[in-house]
Amino acid sequence: MLLVIETMSPREAWGAFTLVFVLAMLAAAATALNWGYAWYEVGAFVIIASSMYAYVVYKRYKVEVVPESDIMLFNDPDDLRILCDIYGLDTSGGARVLRQRLTGFARLNSDRAFVLVVPPAVHALGSALAVKHEAPAAAPEEPMTVPALVMQMVSDRAATGGPLVGGMTRSSARLSTIRSCPVCDSKPPKSGSVCKECGADLEFYAVLAETKVGQRLLSKKAEAARRKLRYPVPHLQGR
């Protein structure tokens, strides 16, 4: 019998983290009352701290669910991998597997516009509280249907010039307002919609950056780029 560690779902992990927060607040309130603080002062502190906690969670970690139609527009495997990481999904596999994983997530959450994503600290708490269970037989990857395959082929060919996320249409007026590349922050070309430094579709990522999930994706892409620049490969100095 194979035993594996069960990973908490985002909702379960946030529930456990919130329980720990509430217990810590009760302990702090009891300590403050024991030290002689008035009950209304302690109550005000608890209300303010709880309101700030709820605001941070829903403002920072509640992000949009990228619909299936928009997922098909991403042709960069790194983008698909980052989206999987944002939603707490497995990040292994190639572009086709990652896209299937994301479309499955989009279908599962098709009835909601936003989901709570899990930061590393909450992930760590979920791992600490995870339980062992018998591993089920590994299910094979869902075969890609013909319409999905056609959509993927179209999106792969249309690296630039194709549709934008959210059903937005391309506009020369929007393109003229882009002052820096949303991916590498370099100066955009005087003409064209492709960044000469990183090859990014400027208008695609500019529209994506208007969403919370897009901001998180671009932040992770920029962080990865900084790590690469931190350890440059020295050029050969001749023989």
Image: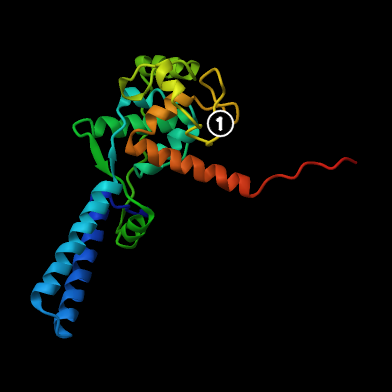
Can you give x and y, in whole percent of width and height, for residue 103 in the image?
Answer: 33, 29
- Direction from residue 227 to residue 148 in the image, left or right: left
Can you give x and y, in whole percent of width and height, for residue 74 in the image?
Answer: 43, 26
Front residue of 127/222: it is 222
Instruction: Tell me the residue at 24%/38% (across/down).
Output: 114
Residue 232 visible to an observer of this rendering: yes
Find numbered disc 1 in the image and state the secondary structure of the residue it sits on: loop
State which quarter of the image contains the C terminus: top right
Residue 84 visible to an observer of this rendering: no
Front residue of 156/237: it is 237
Q: Which residue is mark 1?
A: 187
The residue furthest bottom is: 35
Instruction: Tell me the residue at 43%/29% (across/down).
Output: 205
Instruction: Tell me the residue at 14%/73% (across/down).
Output: 42
Instruction: Tell me the residue at 22%/30% (across/down).
Output: 110
Can you give x and y, in whole percent of width and height, for residue 158 in the image?
Answer: 47, 16
Can you give x and y, in whole percent of width and height, for residue 53 in the image?
Answer: 23, 58
